[in-house]
């Protein structure tokens, strides 16, 4: 099943709605509307039908996933009984949101070729040894992103005032389906709900400056991360054998395969679950596939560029770069204390 | 006003409840219960009183703060009309939660003395220049923590299987009151809702290993962060002049003052707001006050140790260290590709 989130107008402004996406029919189905119609047809009152439909299908995908297996089985029942044309929308006319609103968001760096192409240079810039740190071969480490700045398919990418070097990153987004803690990889397999496309847009200039502080990326990543166009549930995919492509203004810049990942997704999920635990609806990025970003190619993005990431079995995530924001306040440099 | 969150038993298990804390009367007031009583006394039906009270005072503090000024003015009205003893609980008998459930959580490193005491050693361990990176004097940088593993006052600190060197960190937690983006420091002042105590528990052994990967701390911090015992609203505090103390098993280890901070809180908030924006109910840690952790003193925590952080105008946040978890699965080391 392919699951997405869209914005629809209501009496109280635009509201997020969960949808089943059927690209083969060029349509999406508004789940809460379809369930409302289905319940009415069974004799439910309008009030009861609205109440039950909105409880099953809130505007939050992570809240829906947190219901457990009830969510997907309900969605199957809901879409098997479409009777009203109101619940079906043409695929090319909806306003997409990021398909997930995760309570926490991590991003790994699990493709060795990307490490080999980028990290030695970054280390040298940090006045450290120009080699890949051992820890990448020891653990599937990650940074944490800002889940509040996720954008969806066709949303414009804001360009922060502090950057001149904007880049894309071609990644998978793993969506967690149920809670768990201190899992083994074998156990972790059952905790993967689905996969989406993750474009970890990066402001390379600020990123390399701030990473010298050893606290990880922040302003270099957190202005926006694109996710979508929808989530494909795991039953429809071979997660470790997906072709991944990036095109800029229609020109192919990157091509790779999820088969080259150094840590399998179940190892990543098991590692994340250690001590902290997982919650339903959280998001873990795979890291960039080898060759999957501009910095590996010596090329960067310009205002107005259209970035398309395509992953087999999912679809195409398309975003246009905005124009640089006007210069705002910047912190004033401090003078180090002398002692 | 002092605002906290506690757990109370209900028909459907323990539920989080928002409370006003009155340490001077050794009591807390359950806001939803008090508002329910107040509404009943005005002639509301029980159903309407429950509905309105739970809309004003959900279990989530960040959701309550997101209502804007309505929240604090309603709380003032609610507690001015206490008539039922049911709504008042003795301070020493409640089960505390972290007072905030933030949608995103950042932690700065804004005290220069802590930088001087710790970072050169860490840099040397990373085979980088043994000095404080310039970026700390250029911007109030931060890492992002895991808001899902916050614990409250008197909750036990889980001890992960991967650590032998556990430490505390004495910090302030700044609670954001309303949304904003690209603010100046002058504008940012109005976005601070209150302050709480932030104990950034740290597994120093794994932290120094994983930080070599340049993605920032993760497993070294994210197993637990203590917050509390409650939030004191800004009108009751001089944020830049608070005495901060840490005691381990009753012995004072750390003493500092928020007056020594290198970046003022409004500069931190303005910087965080750049490009990303703030949301109501998010959390920003100040970073550790100079001398405010064991690694600066060459001392570490043991299982069963009781860690008390006290901040003037707020209170005492007390947590006991748990015992080390049994060894679980660990990732298997990868062999680097040769080319």
Image (cartoon, coloured by chain):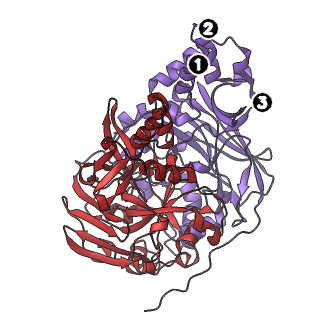
Chain colours: A purple, B red
The quarter of the displayed image where residue B278 is located: bottom right
Label 3 neighbour load within 10 Å: few <14, some 14-19, many 20+: few
The quadrant of the image that shows the N terminus of chain A is top right
Q: CA distance from mark 3 to mark 1?
A: 31 Å
Residue at mark 2: A41
Residue at mark 1: A47
Residue A106 appears in the rendering: no
Along the line of sight, the residue nearer the viewer: B157 or A43: A43
**Residue A15 position within the rendered picture, expressed as x and y whole percent measured from the top left:** 66, 35
Subunit ID for the residue under disc 2: A
Subunit ID for the residue under disc 3: A
Residue B288's disc number: none
Q: Earlier in the sequence, mark 3 or mark 1?
A: 1
Closer to the camera: disc 1 or disc 2? 1
**Residue A21 position within the rendered picture, expressed as x and y whole percent measured from the top left:** 66, 26
Residue A92's disc number: 3
Closer to the camera: disc 2 or disc 3? 2
Q: Earlier in the sequence, mark 2 or mark 3?
A: 2
Label 2 neighbour load within 10 Å: few <14, some 14-19, many 20+: few
Q: Earlier in the sequence, mark 1 or mark 2?
A: 2
The quadrant of the image that shows the C terminus of chain A is bottom left
**Residue A280 position within the rendered picture, expressed as x and y whole percent measured from the top left:** 45, 36
Element type at mark 2: helix
């Amino acid at each position: 099943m392919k699951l997405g989130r869209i914005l629809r107008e209501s009496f109280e402004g635009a509201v997020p709605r969960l949808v089943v996406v059927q690209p083969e029919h060029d349509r999406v189905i508004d789940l809460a509307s379809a369930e409302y119609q289905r319940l009415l047809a069974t004799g439910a009152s309008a009030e009861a039908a609205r109440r039950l439909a909105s409880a099953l299908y809130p505007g939050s995908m992570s809240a829906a996933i947190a219901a457990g297996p009830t969510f997907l089985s309900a969605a199957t029942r809901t879409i098997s009984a479409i009777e009203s044309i109101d619940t079906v929308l043409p695929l090319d006319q909806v306003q997409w949101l990021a398909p997930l609103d995760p309570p926490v968001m991590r991003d790994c760096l699990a493709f060795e070729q990307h490490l080999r192409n980028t990290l030695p240079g970054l280390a040298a810039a940090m006045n450290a040894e120009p080699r890949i740190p051992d820890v990448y071969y020891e653990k599937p480490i990650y940074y944490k992103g800002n889940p509040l700045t996720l954008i969806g398919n066709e949303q414009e990418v804001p360009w922060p005032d502090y950057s001149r070097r904007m880049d894309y990153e071609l990644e998978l987004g793993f969506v967690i389906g149920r809670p768990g803690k201190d899992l083994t990889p074998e156990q972790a397999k059952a905790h993967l709900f689905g996969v989406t496309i993750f474009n970890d847009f990066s402001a390379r200039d600020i990123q390399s400056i701030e990473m010298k502080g050893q606290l990880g990326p922040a302003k270099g990543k957190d202005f926006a991360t694109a996710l979508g166009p929808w989530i494909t549930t795991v039953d429809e995919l071979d997660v470790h054998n997906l072709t991944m492509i990036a095109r800029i203004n229609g020109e192919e810049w990157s091509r790779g395969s999820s088969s080259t990942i150094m840590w399998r997704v179940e190892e990543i999920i098991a590692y994340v679950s250690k001590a902290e635990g997982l919650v339903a609806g959280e998001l873990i990025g795979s890291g960039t596939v080898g060759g999957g970003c501009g910095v590996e190619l010596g090329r960067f993005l310009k205002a107005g560029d259209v970035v398309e990431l395509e992953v087999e079995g999912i679809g195409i995530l398309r975003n246009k770069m905005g124009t640089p924001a006007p210069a705002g306040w910047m912190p004033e440099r401090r003078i180090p204390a002398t002692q």
